[in-house]
Image (spheres, rainbow, N blue to C red):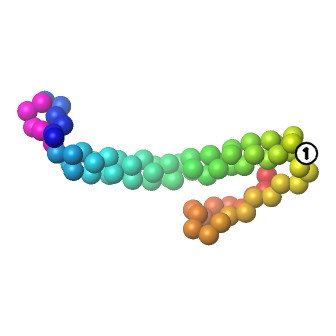
Amino acid sequence: MYFLKENRRNPISRLEYYDEINRTKERIRQDALDRDILYRAEENARRLLKNFLQLAGFHTVYFTRTVGTEPGPETDS
């Protein structure tokens, strides 16, 4: 099976298609790291979970980093 390029005259294989997807994923991932998007998303998730757990009656909420995760500042806020 082939996919068609923009001009529909040069078909590309699935392998080429998936290779391009993988190259694009890495470029987007690196852009997110460069702009601290992943760090900010993690901080937003922590804030959301902390508020949710405090509303559920937990008084103190701590977050720790697990082995193998991206390095970043440690906070418990």
Q: Residue at the location (81% across, 42% down)?
A: 51
**Depth order, front residue of 56/43:** 56
Q: Position of residue 36 (x, y in %)?
A: 57, 50
Tell me: 53 left or right of 28. Answer: right
**What are the residue bounds of the magenta stretch?**
8-12
Give the prevailing secondary structure in the magenta stretch: loop
Give neighbour class at mark 1: few <14, some 14-19, many 20+ (Cα, 10 Å): few
Q: Residue at the location (73% across, 63% down)?
A: 64
**Which secondary structure lies at badge 1?**
loop
Q: Position of residue 60 (x, y in %)?
A: 88, 54
Q: Residue at the location (80% across, 41% down)?
A: 52
Q: Position of residue 66 (x, y in %)?
A: 65, 66
Q: Position of residue 15 (x, y in %)?
A: 21, 50
* Residue 49 quadrant: top right
Say whether residue 11 is magenta: yes
**Depth order, front residue of 71/52:** 52
Tell me: 74 left or right of 27. Answer: right
* Residue 76 quadrant: bottom right
Residue designated by label 1: 57
